Amino acid sequence: MRQQMKKLLFLMLVIATLSVPFVKTDANSQVVYKIPISNEVEKGLYAFLERSFEEAKAANAEAIILDIHTPGGFVDAAGQIAKLLDTSEIPIIAYINDDALSAGAFLALHAKEIYMSPRGRIGAAQVIESTGNAADEKAHSAWLSAMENAAESSGREIKYARAMAEPSIDLPEYGAGVGKLLTLTASEALSVGYSEGTVASFEELLERTGYQDAEVISTKETFSESIARFVTNPIVVPILLSVAGLGLVVELYSPGFGVAGTMGIVSLLLFFYGHMIAGLAGYESLILFVVGAALIVAEIFIAGGIAGVIGAVAIVGSIIMAGGNPMYMAVSVLIAIAIAAIGAVIIIKIFGKKLHLFNKVVLMDATDTESGYVSNVNRTELIGQKAVTTTPLRPSGTVDLEGERIDVVSEGSYIDRGKDVTIVKVEGSRIVVRESIERGEVE
């Protein structure tokens, strides 16, 4: 028994040993994560940064260095990323190797330390609307406050952060004021305390921060994260939805299933896939879209229109739910609907009777004379001719005119079968007769 217990304990010890992950035995080893912030700052970037921060935490990284080169981006995305930076347990260093403008400047100010390359710039952070104009007073005030808080949180003088977002602040020694936003060069940022130093290379940055012997792990966007960043860009979203709407409309009017329908479906798949990868959409929005599409398909077989209306509302709702900003998504959907409607009108005007699916729903044929259709002939030549009733006229019935059976009506009185009548009026298909007085009943 005792021998068996020893064997069992030995086996458990082996299993426990094997289950422990292999780690570096060097207690002095350091790990630093280098994470790029490039191109525009948008919500798709958040998913990449969140994943990179989690990897850095799992690797017990000593520091995270943000390699910044961005012209800016969108306020809501920058705010979300700033929260990620503020809640990080790992010290964050911003390395501005080129430009940190607009939202890039805002993110850099959330770092514990800022280092810049000799060509680096930071600033020009005014909020701009999609029209290219400055934002309204409310949005501008909120962004101004966010810039000030970012500077204050990292112990920097707030007037320079304010001048980056407010063109009326006069700092002539740095080229700011009189309608110009503050943008600091590397040397200027160092002089006002917005940089801890100017470094010629990333290796010099590591030496300045004491991580010259650290293992540097560079993270890169995965293919799916790159797609997410692209399709969640606020400029791309309305284009993607417009392509989807127009493609599906063209496919409805086309025989079979072709390129237009494929483009529409692919656009929708990209939209939902990118927003789900970016963490903006959940399965509930995708399920709602599928239910809406099923109801619209059911409308083809179920009369009434209710299923189609509910399906359309469900699809629009699912798209709005998938975006981070409901108002912007609603505008994007309206743009897509308008483009699809215009496309449908153009298709109807150009192709007319060649349309396929809608020929089953809407009567496209015209009953014109060119197509062989004619209205009832107005037979005025019958006026004055004599006929014999073959049925009683009460007041309608039929008469026999030289072997031709004709539907007629009397002037109002009852006329028995076999009576002689005279045609007195022809109004299109309505032929009026009157009983002839000179002849009696036909034997």
Image (tube, rainbow, N blue to C red):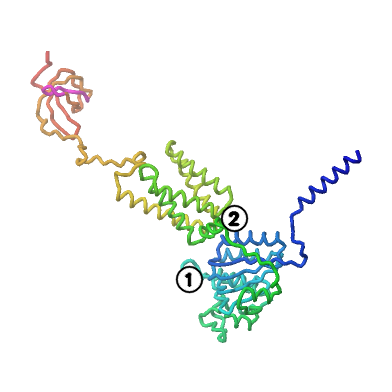
The picture places residue 284, in percent across and down from the top left corner, at 58, 47
Q: Amino acid at mark 1?
A: Asn
The picture places residue 169, in percent across and down from the top left corner, at 57, 81
For the N terminus, the image quarter is top right
Magenta residues (range): 395-404
Front-lying residue, 99 or 366: 99
The residue carrying mark 2 is 279
Q: Is residue 106 above or below residue 269?
A: below
Using the rendered view, name the quadrant where residue 100 is placed. Answer: bottom right
- Can residue 388 be seen? yes
Sooner in the amino-acid sequence: mark 2 or mark 1 = 1
User: Is residue 219 shown in magenta?
Assistant: no
Query: Which of the numbered marks, if any, corresponds to residue 396?
Result: none
Whole-angstrom CA distance, mark 2 to mark 1, is: 30 Å
Query: Which of the numbered marks, if any, corresponds to residue 133?
Result: 1
Q: Amino acid at mark 2?
A: Gly
At a point 41% along the width and 55% down the height, the residue shown is 338
Q: Tags 2 and 1 in contact by the CB under 8 Å rule?
A: no
